[in-house]
Image (cartoon, rainbow, N blue to C red):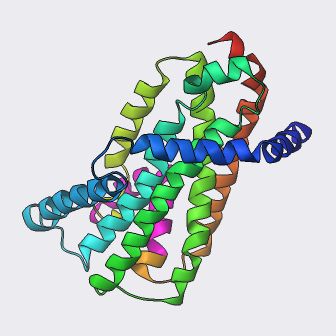
Amino acid sequence: MKNKFIHEIREIYSFRHLLVNLIKSDIKLRYKNSFLGFLWHILNPLFYLGILALVFSQIIRIQMENYILFLFAGLVSWRMIQQTSIIATHSIVNNQELIKKIYTPKLIFPLATVISQYIDHLTLSLILFIFLFILKGKISFVLFLSPVVIILIFIFSLGLSLFFATSYVYVKDTPHIIAIGFQALFFLTPILYPLSVLSPKLEKFFKINPLYYFVEYFRYPFYYAKMPPLEQTCIVCGLSLITFGLGIYIFLRKKESFIFKF
C-alpha cells in the first residue's frame, strides 16, 4: 500500500497541470452566470451567521463573551469539513466520462475538489480574522498557528472525501446518507453553544463526536486566543491522520474497479 501511495503521488505530480486546471475550472463553474459571483460564498454564511446570532443571543439568550465571534469560528470550521466532504463525494462519479476516455490518476479528482473548496474557506477565515478586530476579540501570537489548524482540518476533510467519493461509486444513496448525517451532527457539535451549558453526562456523550474536537481546536487561535491543550492537539492530529489513512487506503484499493461500477 505504501508503494501504491508513493506511485499515486508521483503520478499526480506528473499530471500537476491537469490538477491546476481542474481547480480553476471548479471555481469558475461554481460562480458561472452569477451576478455576485464569488461574493455569494461570503454573503451566504454571513447572512446565516446573522440569523443564528440574532436567535441565540437575543431570543434564546446564550450569555457569553463575544458570542458572535464564538459562533462565526464554529461555522467556518464546520463548513470546512461539511461542505467540502459533501461536494467532494461527487468528484469521481461526476468525472466518470473523463475517467473512461483517458488515463488520469483518479486521486486527482477528489484532491482538486477539496483544494478548490479550501480556497473559498480560506477567504472566510480571512473574514473571520477581520471580525476579530471589528468585534475587539482577543489578539494573541497563537493566531500564527491558525495555518497549522487549517492544514489538520484539510487532511481530515480529504480523508472523509476520499471515503465518501469511493462509497458513492458503489452505493448511490451515499450523498443522501451523508447529508442526513451532517444535519444531525450539526446539532450534536458545539457550534451554536459552548459545551459548558450541558450536564457532565451529556458533555461526555457529545465528546464522542470527532467533529467536536476540530471545531473547538479551530476556536483556540481565533476565539480563546491561547494554545490548545496538548491532549486536544494529540486527538486532532490522531483523528486527521487516521481518517486520511483509512480514506486513502480504501480509495487506492477500490480505484481500479471504479470503471466497472459506473
Instruction: Return the x and y of residue 37 as percentages of the image width and height.
Output: 34, 51
Instruction: Return the x and y of residue 69 as percentages of the image width and height.
Output: 31, 73
240 left or right of 133 in image: right
Query: What is the quadrant of the C terminus in the image?
Result: top right
Magenta span: 197-220
Instruction: Return the x and y of residue 169 as percentages of the image width and height.
Output: 60, 20
Residue 212 drawn above or below residue 114:
below
**Outermost residue toward the right in this view:** 3
Instruction: Return the x and y of residue 36 as percentages of the image width and height.
Output: 29, 53
59 left or right of 1 in image: left
Residue occupying image coordinates x 23% and y 55%:
48
Q: Is residue 96 magenta?
A: no
Residue occupying image coordinates x 49% and y 50%:
81
Q: Does any portion of residue 253 appear in the rendered image?
A: yes
Residue 225 drawn above or below residue 96:
below
Between 261 and 177, the one lying in front of the other is 261
234 left or right of 43 in image: right
